[in-house]
Image (tube, rainbow, N blue to C red):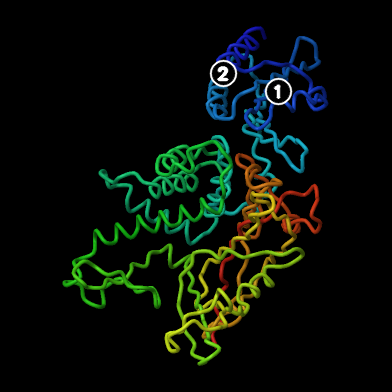
Amino acid sequence: LNCFFIFFSTFSFFFSTYYFAYSPHQLQSDFWYYRFLRSRNAYIKVEHESETTNPEKQFYQVILFVPIRELHKARERLLRNLKNHPIESNNTQIRIERERIRSEKTVIRRLVLGLMGAAGSKLEKALGDQFPEGERYFGFENFGNTCYCNSVLQALYFCVPFREQLLEYYTSNKSVADSEENLMTCLADLFSQISSQKKKTGVIAPKRFVQRLKKQNELFRSYMHQDAHEFLNYLLNEVVDILEKEAKATTKPERETSSSSSPEKIANGPKAPLANGVHKEPVVTWVHNIFQGILTNETRCLRCETVTARDETFLDLSLDIEQNSSITSCLKNFSSTETLHAEDKFFCDKCCSLQEAQKRMKIKKPPHILVIHLKRFKYMEQLGRYKKLSYRVVFPLELKLSNTVEPYTDVEYSLFAVVVHVGSGPNHGHYVSLVKSHNHWLFFDDENVEMIEESAVQTFFGSSQEYSSNTDHGYILFYESLGPTTK
């Protein structure tokens, strides 16, 4: 037992931390303890329960305060030493508890990192015989405020078409010895690690992917709170860039390419001019086939009635939100007619002058996977900063998209993932994700994976009142098309 405490004392000193051995009740009632943590520190709690010479069990609890940036190093070293330490029994639990600030209240969110010697997973037991064959449910380690990354990666992993394409890419490229590492190869490797696990559940460290992400983009290098939507946009566009470069590298020169083998054209999209004046049609990748939709922007001059149409492609839709609204109403507002007047007049080519006009946006071609970003962070001029809109916005499990143009009408979608922002403001908080897999809803909170009821999804709609203790709000929604209905 002495060796046990000597080890943890040395370990805590190594990380310039403090060592305590309090009961959970003492810790929770000590306000100074909360003040000490703030947002820069976390603690690892080791609970040890062992048999003594008496039939009674003795309980020991060790608290190690660790800077957030050293959290993953501390956990890895701790796990390594515990495995080799003779005093540890199968009842040892390792937990990380970190502070979250909600409406000026400091609360503790508990993340179970590992349960050594545990007899099976709670999730496996909960699913029982209904556990999907060949499926894997793995949490992701947090490397210091990387929850924005973890939550999005979980949603993308359970986006089946995306996962299948990425695993196919991994299989066809893993034998290439001189293949250069990039964000896509790291992501493909991570997805392959998950899908090839012998265990059905557990925790995986997306270390290689996170390191590559930070290396490529300085925005994600700090340990500050990041935006999940910004990360999703960056990731998808990065994958597109990589696929386009690979396609161009393997495509024959334009003059040798027949029309039948030329890259597919993005509908009415702008053509990219080459130096010699030849126009090359943009490459359509499998990312485009999965996520890309087409918007048509129609502007009607109120003087000559001429309608000007311009097509735009999108990988996700960003919607303005209102209190006590729904995704359907937000989409209607997105496609509502707007009058351009005064300083916003439209330059009509036919009239050759600025004219009042009416403008509207409609979905010309709906995507297979519809990603909806709710604009919950709004810049308030009177405050001089961004504020989180905790509005209640109902997102249905089944969505009918009616604001489309022919030949599409009433395209139906099914919700399969939600990235949730937890917190009262844009510059701090936490991200978790809800995922539907084989008719089961799962809750992913970094390393922790739990099964939830379908009815629990509605608790993430938002708050019907401005000041509410509920700060868990749906932020990014992922819908899969059930097949377009054409007229």
In the drawing, does residue 73 fall left or right of residue 377? left
Report helix, strand or loop for mark 1: strand
Position of residue 39 measured from the top left corner of the image (x, y, whole percent): 65, 32
**Which picture quadrant has residue 86?**
top right
Q: Nearer the viewer, residue 333 or 198?
A: 333
Where is residue 448 drawn, in percent x and y? 64, 41
Q: Residue furthest left?
A: 256
Dot label at residue 15: 2
**Image quadrant in which the N terminus is located:** top right
The quadrant where residue 79 appears: top right
Q: Crowding at label 1, few (<14), some or many (≥20) Cα neighbours within 10 Å?
A: some
Residues at badges 2 and 1 in contact (C-beta under 8 Å)?
no
Q: Is residue 467 above or below residue 307?
A: above
Direction bottom: furthest residue: 304
Query: Residue drawn at (60%, 41%), measured in percent from left and top?
Result: 446
Q: Is residue 394 above or below residue 344?
A: above
- For the residue pair 74 and 455, the one nearer the viewer reads as 74
**Residue 344 location, x and y as percent?**
55, 74
